[in-house]
């Protein structure tokens, strides 16, 4: 999910990042002076069942297999961070990972917090230079934001070789 962080919520993000020991992303515009939003929060989430399975395996007799789940999630988040920044022209994000949701249930997810400004020839300029007033949305699943044509390097370590795909239901 891609969410725009408006100037009214920018302070919450700033406090959260500082509390967790993370830096503000380059191009963060807390006042919304140069752009209509302070930044963007791209949420990448592992399916809850896979998160729970990873925690179960780490506490059981196969801890090495269980550690592969969060390791794969971290590698995927880094890959998405690079590809998203490359595709949009954004500066490097702040990555904030969590192993649990707010109810303390297992849920691996990472917030990629981007600034709304990018360095240009004339200083920092908004990513949305076209002046569009539409709210940004993510049209694909957060776990599949990387290029569908490339099999992620970690997929083989989980026993998936990319050749066998689950059947898809027809769109109605």
Image (tube, rainbow, N blue to C red):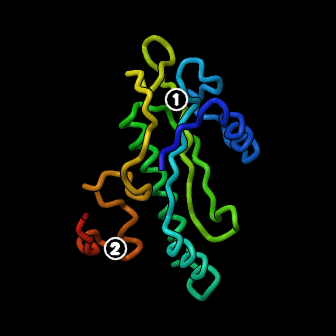
Residue in view at x 59 percent, y 88 percent: 61
Dot placed on the residue nearer the N-terminal end, 1 or 2 = 1
Front-most of 39 and 74? 39
Mark 2 lies on a secondary structure that is loop
The image position of residue 25, as x and y in percent, is 59, 34
Residue in view at x 53 percent, y 22 percent: 35
From the image, tell me which residue sits under label 2: 160
60 lies left or right of 124: right
- Neighbor class of circle 2 (other Cα within 10 Å; few <14, some 14-19, many 20+) is few
The image position of residue 69, as x and y in percent, is 51, 70
Front-most of 73 and 166? 166
Front-most of 8 and 140? 8
Residue in view at x 50 percent, y 14 percent: 123
The image position of residue 118, as x and y in percent, is 48, 25
From the image, tell me which residue sits under label 1: 116
Mark 1 lies on a secondary structure that is loop
**Residue 127, quarter of the rendered image:** top left
160 lies left or right of 75: left
Residue in view at x 39 percent, y 34 percent: 88
40 lies left or right of 140: right
Q: Split into 4 quadrants, where in the image is the C terminus?
A: bottom left
């Amino acid at each position: 999910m891609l969410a725009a962080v408006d100037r009214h919520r920018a302070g919450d993000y700033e406090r959260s990042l500082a509390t967790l020991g993370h830096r503000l992303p380059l191009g963060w515009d807390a006042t919304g002076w140069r752009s209509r939003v302070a930044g963007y929060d791209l949420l990448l989430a592992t399916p809850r069942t896979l998160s729970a399975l990873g925690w179960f395996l780490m506490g059981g007799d196969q801890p090495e297999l269980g550690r592969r789940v969060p390791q794969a999630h971290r590698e995927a988040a880094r890959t998405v961070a690079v590809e998203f920044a490359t595709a949009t022209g954004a500066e490097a994000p702040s990555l904030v990972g969590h192993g649990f949701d707010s109810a303390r249930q297992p849920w691996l997810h990472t917030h990629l917090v981007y600034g709304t400004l990018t360095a240009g020839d004339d200083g920092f300029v908004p990513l949305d230079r076209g002046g569009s007033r539409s709210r940004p949305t993510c049209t694909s699943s957060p776990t599949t934001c990387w290029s569908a044509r490339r099999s992620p390097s970690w997929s083989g370590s989980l026993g998936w070789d990319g050749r066998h795909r689950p059947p898809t239901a027809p769109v109605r």
